[in-house]
């Protein structure tokens, strides 16, 4: 498996506003280099807060000053408590200097447009990272009242000779998730909900607020607004260059940070009814930015393709879309490491990390070659020049097999997925196959370097791996994403089984050796599917959900369920019961392994315990493994390896490769 060991993973890239230099983060170190379109970043300079370059510590989140002369970044390289602080570097021989004194969790720093301040998301006195993915604190005290940690927007001034304590902008009774500066640097727009923050993102509102201390002004409340956005989620607020409008992504999103939907815009002054600028399109927008002429650029997923598109309006003062054009697209994953699908952009160019199942990650630069270009349909990338700036991984080769994008139809839907072939594939042989269902459900499997996933390991061991994007996924438009509401495990399972049938017709897969696995929503699907069909020979359910009725009262994020189930479990228990695997447990004959973290707030461990207990009572082969001090996403490398080892052994026992 040399492909993983040889890979250098870049986690963040940031292009300077003048487009002349690029910064990137790799293994907790920040580097800066001139943008060299010949693909040579060897003339790089390390930027660090560490007194010694040999110290093991972490620098990250580099952001450029608006004049491109300096960089600010977060670092825990000073002190011994692992606390991040903001540092400022003039990119000269002088060492980076601290500009903040923080005590808590900090992330997402952003310069004000005038360069005088840096705002960031901050949980003062934090005991854990914000959000539902991190391990939850053990329950004690007055539940729901004691120990609640609130994320606020705070800021520090740039240019002070001494580190300063931050001043808070947003109030203590709102948990902020994302924010953006106004173009005149006097205000913020942000998405926030009432505490606790991990639960109330699904009912969060859009606000504006003067940084001088004025009270926040509600611009949009999705809970009360009429139209297609009613009851759904908002993310990535972005203020227009003229200060008159705020654009954002709106839609049905099952997880904060996994953003997808349509592009909306509202007036910044009075927040009238939002305008959907991409209604009915068969794509999912993930990230947006305003261009210098008042246009909106956005990244989107369309099937298995990552796109960057531009909305061009009739005039700078109009929000009537004249055309929606593809600037460029790749059958690969692209992003700069900040938000889902975000790109580092400046006038005339964009920088991003690009990788696919066959291409190891590298830093790329896209240069705009025309002011307003109409690319021909046969070459949608004609309006940009593309330069691979880094060659860190020229020698990295995948240890897994070739991956095909496959499409099929079911129940009137067009569905896309990925099929990873066994390594050393021989079309004359029969192979087993594992179906890996993604989490979410509002998410999607995309093409990216697979060195850290289950799929690549199973491919190396001689399995086909099908990674479907059934209804409920991103990539086919908002109607497709919403198509599994009140229908978990039924229509989406039919889509998956139709995908299995498509593969069986085209590839040498042994229909008697097909397994199923997934994490989170994929864990639920693994539990539910084996109650509905006997087509799967074995299953591994990671952080699954077996009983939606009890789950409603156990998890720390119950607000996400209302948009999907239509009502609380107390108002409509029947819809929850219909989709609960535990109610069909006597149908199960499939050997099933369950794994989960003991402090998982999204999919609590009792759900896996209940499923395992029921299978054991039914004398179905089963095993449950609970990992200590872990949340929804396992962070301990030993635990992650143990999950992989156990899954390999489980499938190897019940449906071995040849």
Image (tube, grey):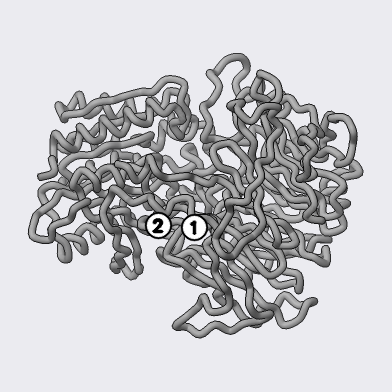
Q: Position of residue 203 (x, y in %)?
A: 63, 46
Mark 1 or mark 2, which has the lower sequence index? 1
Q: Where is mark 1, residue-wise?
A: 354
Q: Residue 105, relative to residue 12: is it above or below?
A: above
- In this rendering, would 489 be left or right of 428? right
Label number found at residue 359: 2
Q: Determine the residue positioned at 41% across, 29% down.
A: 637
Q: How far apart are marks 1 and 2 (CA)?
A: 8 Å
Assign the N terminus to one quadrant of the image.
Answer: top left
Instruction: Out of 126 and 132, give the one closest to the viewer.
Output: 126
207 shown above or below 274: above
Tell me: residue 589, above or below residue 224.
above
Q: Quadrant of residue 304?
A: bottom left
Residue for point 62% across, 51% down: 43
Q: Is residue 511 left or right of residue 394?
A: left
Categorize mark 2 by other alpha carbons within 10 Å: few (<14), some (14-19), many (20+): some
Name the quarter where the C terminus is drawn. Answer: top left
Q: Quick check: can you spot residue 525?
A: yes
Question: Disc 1 on helix, strand or loop?
Answer: strand
- The image position of residue 122, as x and y in percent, is 72, 34
Residue at x-position 27% and y-position 27%: 612
Q: x and y percent of residue 385 in the render?
A: 57, 73
């Amino acid at each position: 498996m040399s492909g993983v060991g040889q890979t250098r993973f870049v986690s963040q890239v940031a292009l300077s506003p003048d487009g002349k230099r690029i910064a990137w983060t790799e293994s907790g170190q920040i580097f800066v280099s001139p943008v060299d379109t010949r693909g040579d970043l060897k003339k790089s300079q390390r930027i660090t807060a560490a007194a010694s370059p040999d110290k093991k510590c972490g620098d990250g989140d580099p952001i450029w000053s608006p004049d491109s002369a300096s960089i600010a970044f977060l670092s825990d390289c000073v002190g011994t408590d692992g606390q991040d602080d903001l540092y400022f570097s003039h990119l000269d021989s002088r060492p980076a200097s601290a500009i903040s004194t923080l005590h808590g969790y900090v992330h997402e720093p952003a310069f004000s447009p005038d360069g005088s301040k840096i705002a960031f998301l901050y949980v003062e006195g934090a005991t854990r990272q914000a959000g539902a993915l991190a391990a939850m604190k053990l329950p004690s005290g007055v539940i729901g009242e004691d120990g609640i940690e609130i994320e606020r927007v705070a800021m520090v001034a740039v240019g002070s000779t001494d580190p300063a304590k931050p001043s808070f902008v947003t109030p203590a009774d709102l948990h902020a998730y994302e924010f953006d500066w106004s173009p005149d640097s006097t205000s913020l727009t942000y998405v926030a909900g009432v505490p606790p923050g991990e639960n109330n993102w699904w009912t969060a509102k859009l606000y504006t607020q003067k940084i001088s201390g004025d009270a926040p002004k509600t611009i949009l409340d999705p809970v009360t607004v009429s139209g297609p956005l009613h009851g759904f989620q908002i993310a990535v607020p972005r203020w227009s260059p003229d200060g008159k409008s705020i654009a954002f992504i709106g839609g049905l999103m099952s997880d904060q940070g996994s953003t997808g939907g349509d592009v909306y815009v509202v007036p910044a002054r009075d927040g009238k009814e939002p305008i959907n600028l991409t209604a009915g399109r068969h794509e999912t927008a993930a990230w947006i930015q305003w261009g210098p002429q008042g246009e909106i650029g956005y990244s989107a997923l369309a099937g298995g393709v990552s796109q960057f598109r531009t909305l061009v309006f009739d005039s700078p003062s109009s929000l009537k879309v004249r055309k929606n054009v593809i600037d460029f697209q790749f059958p690969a994953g692209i992003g700069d490491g900040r938000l889902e699908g975000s790109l580092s952009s400046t006038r005339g160019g964009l920088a991003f990390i690009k990788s696919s199942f066959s291409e190891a990650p590298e830093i790329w630069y896209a240069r705009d070659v025309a002011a307003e270009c109409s690319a021909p349909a046969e070459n949608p990338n004609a309006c940009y020049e593309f330069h691979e700036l880094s060659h860190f991984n020229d020698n990295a080769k995948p240890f897994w097999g070739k991956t095909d994008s496959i499409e099929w139809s079911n129940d009137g839907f067009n569905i896309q997925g990925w099929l990873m072939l066994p390594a050393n594939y021989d079309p004359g042989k029969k192979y087993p196959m594992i179906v890996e269902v993604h989490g979410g459900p509002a998410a999607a499997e995309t093409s990216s370097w697979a060195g850290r996933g289950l799929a690549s390991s199973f491919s190396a061991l001689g399995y086909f791996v099908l990674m479907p994007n059934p209804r409920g996924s991103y990539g086919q438009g908002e109607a497709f994403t919403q198509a599994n509401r009140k229908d978990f495990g039924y229509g989406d399972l039919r889509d998956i089984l139709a995908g299995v049938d498509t593969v069986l017709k085209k590839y040498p897969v042994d229909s008697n050796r097909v397994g199923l696995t997934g994490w989170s929503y994929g864990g639920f699907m693994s539990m539910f599917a084996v109650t509905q069909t006997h087509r799967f020979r074995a299953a591994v359910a990671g952080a699954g959900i077996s009983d939606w009725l009890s789950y409603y009262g156990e998890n720390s994020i119950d607000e996400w369920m209302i948009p999907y189930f239509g009502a609380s479990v107390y108002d409509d228990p029947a819809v929850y019961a219909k989709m609960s695997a535990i109610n069909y447990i006597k149908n199960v004959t499939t050997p099933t392994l369950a794994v989960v973290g003991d402090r998982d707030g999204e999919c609590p461990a009792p759900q896996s315990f209940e499923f395992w207990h029921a299978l054991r009572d039914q004398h179905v082969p089963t095993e449950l493994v609970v990992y200590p001090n872990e949340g929804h996403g396992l962070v301990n490398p030993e635990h992650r390896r143990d999950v992989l080892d156990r899954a390999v052994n489980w499938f190897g026992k019940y449906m071995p490769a040849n």
